[in-house]
Amino acid sequence: MTIIIRFTVALIALFIWPVLYHLSIDGSAKFFMLLDVVSLSGLIGILVIATFKFKPLHGFLLVLLYVLALTQGFRLMLTLDQVTSLNGFFSTLLSVVSILFFIGARGYLRSEKGLAAFKIEKS
């Protein structure tokens, strides 16, 4: 469980960079900023739920991880044309790493160890 918390903190630190970058640009980048802010808010939600291990919010955490993976997949599809620039490459890399984290964390939380961390009996 601590690996999820540590990796979530790292992703929060990495998602602050695109938000600050999109704040400095006018135009169509505001939509990307919306996706980044949604992802950043979701990561903070994951951090709070996983840190305090709110048992009633375990199902919500699974749904939140799935929605964030879909959001990052959408962002990945929108930024694939910019992969040749340095900024686009790091943005694409961040999306791919975060998608893999969201899917892996969701799988862990559905496993026996994840259920035991939240003190939920497998039915």
Image: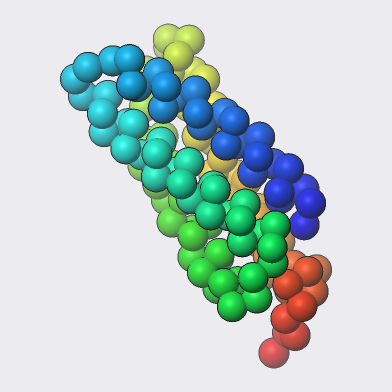
In the rendered image, the quadrant that contains the C terminus is: bottom right
Q: Whole-percent x and y of residue 8?
A: 64, 44
Colour scheme of the rendered structure: rainbow
Exactly how many numbered labels are in the figure? 0
Q: Is residue 63 above or below residue 105?
A: below
Q: Residue at x 49, y 65 (%)?
A: 63
- Residue 119 lies in quadrant: bottom right
Does 31 sit left or right of 80 as displayed? left
Residue visible at 54% across and 47% down in the picture:
43
**Rendered location of residue 27, percent (x, y):** 19, 20
Q: Is residue 21 left or right of residue 106?
A: left
Q: Where residue 62 sits in the image (x, y, percent)?
A: 55, 65
Task: Answer whether residue 65 is visible to the viewer in this image.
Answer: yes
Q: Nearer the viewer, residue 19 or 114?
A: 19
Q: Nearer the viewer, residue 115 or 92?
A: 115
Q: Position of residue 106 (x, y in %)?
A: 62, 60
* Screen quadrant of the N terminus: bottom right
Q: Give left or right: position of 80 versus 53.
A: left
In this rendered view, identify the residue nearer to me: 23 or 121.
23
The residue most toward the left is 27
- The answer to whether residue 97 shows anywhere in this view is no
Q: Is residue 4 above or below residue 56?
A: above
Residue sitting farthest toward the bottom:
123
